[in-house]
Amino acid sequence: MAELKYLSGFGNECASEDPRCPGSLPEGQNNPQVCPYNLYAEQLSGSAFTCPRSTNKRSWLYRILPSVSHKPFEAIDQGHVTHNWDEIAPDPNQLRWKPFEIPKASQKQVDFVKGLHTLCGAGDIRSNNGLAIHIFLCNTSMENKCIYNSDGDFLIVPQKGKLLIYTEFGKMLVKPNEICVIQRGMRFSIDVFEETRGYILEVYGVHFELPDLGPIGANGLANPRDFLIPVAWYEDRQVPGGYTVINKYQGKLFAARQYFSPFNVVAWHGNYTPYKYNLENFMVINSVAFDHADPSIFTVLTAKSVRPGVAIADFVIFPPRWGVTEKTFRPPYYHRNCMSEFMGLIKGHYEAKQGGFLPGGGSLHGAMTPHGPDADCFERASKAKLAPERIADGTMAFMFESSLSLVVTEWGLKISSCLDGNYYKCWEPLKSHFTPNSKNPTGPN
Ligand SMILES: [Fe+2]
């Protein structure tokens, strides 16, 4: 496959034409009486018409046939996609999952849509406030099938296997250690090349933004120029046997049939697009004296709530970096948080837990649920010589952190059979080192 081209810049106003049709973008207006190449003009609105300019998002698509040309939508099997947060009793325990099992292609062909499993979530789709975390487990490309989400944005984190994503805006190749965001309403279809697994953070009703940098200044963390946007690409393909458009609408799946490929956009312009980002480009900032900065310094993208500083969800990563702090317990501190913390591992070993938390698995520490380094990690780090050291080489752990109190689905707690019932045991060996008659910190023996 020839290398794909991209435009760049987070949230930029972009314009793109498929080079096979030069001049296909109308000049000087959006809606000519007749468009160049006799295309249809269609606007995709990602924000209310009246949003302030800084948050207003829309794109104009110039396509062979408009999206409205299809048979009626009908409900289809939901599989394990749900937004029912009351299907099973809440569980306040620390939860950890072994790597979620990918179905074998030789036994059952499963594409991206069939392979979607909702793990946890909270909030309300109809009032556009909340989120869901899904796991995708698939082994087959989507064939003559696309999906779009009426409920929110998908932030997709591939963990095993690359994704070739066809969108109305063009094609993106997204490999493990890259992420992509397919925003609300955008149609896409995913080709896979092996048994493939990953995580999805879905946020309802809001879009991801780059976090404010405050005193950090104009540069750092995820830099806007590193976000890549596909270039226009179309196929004028008739599908006499029927092309299936799947819609996730109010949490349910529906399908409609049409007789042409939806990837028929010859040109587009606007600031509402899918995009991808390579996590290697994250500029890590950290303490260089003593103590820890809070993990918010590792925020790649945030989906803000209406409360200042409080996110519906943040996407946070823990990249390879130097640890140089002096007189400091260097692993993550023991913690109880009003936010819910879901963690996943793309590759390597997470520093605070050497075993048990594996690539393709996950953990969830709900609101105010205590968590922190396991007993081994505590003992080792309390005695360690504090020389500068590399942390997390070959590793990429991430966190979806939410102000909502996340509910785990029946699939997450039972059906997946991946829940690790022994997780709590990693803290059981923690022992008291209290020396009531001596103030001197001696550390563990
Ligand atoms: Fe935490």
Image (cartoon, rainbow, N blue to C red):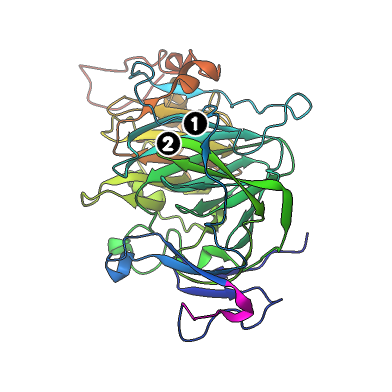
Label 2 neighbour load within 10 Å: few <14, some 14-19, many 20+: some
> Which of the image's four quarters has the N terminus?
bottom right
- Where residue 117 sits: x, y (%)? 53, 30
SS assignment at label 1: loop
Q: Is residue 219 covered in magenta?
A: no
Q: Which residues are magenta?
A: 31-39
Which amino acid type is shown beneath numbered disc 1? Val
**Which picture quadrant has residue 401?**
top left
> Which of the image's four quarters has the C terminus?
top left
Locate residue 198 relative to residue 104 in the image: left or right.
left
Instruction: Specify whether residue 367 is in view.
Output: yes
Q: Nearer the viewer, residue 285 or 100?
A: 100
Q: Which residue is mark 2?
A: 251
Instruction: Specify whether residue 350 is in view.
Output: no
Relative to 153, say whether 126 is above or below. above
Which amino acid type is shown beneath numbered disc 2? Gly
Quadrant containing ligand 1 reads: top left
Locate residue 8 relative to residue 209 in the image: left or right.
right
Relative to 75, say whether 325 is above or below. below
**Which picture quadrant has residue 37?**
bottom right
Q: Residue at x 51, y 55 (%)?
A: 186
Residue contact at pointers 1 and 2, CB within 8 angstroms:
yes
Q: Is residue 32 covered in magenta?
A: yes
Q: Nearer the viewer, residue 339 or 187?
A: 187
Q: Residue at x 58, y 60 (%)?
A: 168
Q: Which residue is mark 1?
A: 81
- Where residue 152 sits: x, y (%)? 41, 47
Q: Residue at x 79, y 27 (%)?
A: 106
- Where residue 150 sits: x, y (%)? 43, 47
SS assignment at label 2: loop
How many tags in the picture?
2
